[in-house]
Amino acid sequence: MSSLNPAVADFRSETYPEFSGKIQDTYIEGYVPNSLSAPHSSLLRTSTWVGMGLMMGSVPFAGILIWALGVITEPAGLQSDAQHQTLLWIGIITTIVGVVVASFLIWFGRRNYRRYRAETGRKD
């Protein structure tokens, strides 16, 4: 069919509508958007998901840190003192780096939502 045929629907403009102005101007009073399809949704950002994954990934390193502290305070087993210190520092460094990087990525991924809240004056 011809692209000039008015009977053929424009799939792109119907599926991905272009809004003029700000989308929050079209919201009904009192509506709190929580949709994944909202343009300010933090769940659409890769950095948010990578940050959450890194935050979960830092849990095993926190476990290494806790285990090393436990072994230092209550020595048992055949490991030398140098191994405890090494594991302690590995746990400290990797936990701190993982949490800091993850926190930054989550903060960065939520930038559009913070801007939306500032523009609309929302408190939630």
Image: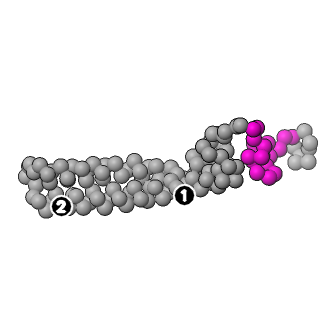
Q: Which residue is mark 1?
A: 108
Q: Please, what is the three-letter code of the amino acid marked with disc 2?
A: Gln
Q: Which residue is mark 2?
A: 85
Residue 61 x %, y %? 30, 53
Residue drawn at x 44%, y 55% as measured from the top left? 102
Q: Is residue 28 magenta?
A: yes
Q: Which residue occupies the foreground of this view, 1 or 103?
A: 103
9 or 27: nearer the eye? Answer: 27
Q: Amino acid at mark 1?
A: Phe
- Vertically, is 91 above or below 42? below
Q: Label 2 neighbourhood size at 10 Å, few (<14), some (14-19), many (20+)?
A: some
Q: Which residues are magenta?
A: 8-29
Location of the C terminus (image quadrant): top right
Answer few, some or many: residues within 10 Å of disc 1's Cα (few below 14, many 20 plus, some between 14 and 19): some
Identify the residue at image location x=91%, y=44%: 5
Q: Position of residue 98 (x, y in %)?
A: 38, 57
Q: Is residue 12 visible?
A: no
Q: Position of residue 100 (x, y in %)?
A: 41, 59
Viewed as shown, does residue 94 lie left or right of 12? left
Question: In which quadrant of the rendered view does residue 11 lie?
Answer: top right
The part of the image, by quadrant, that contains residue 109 is bottom right
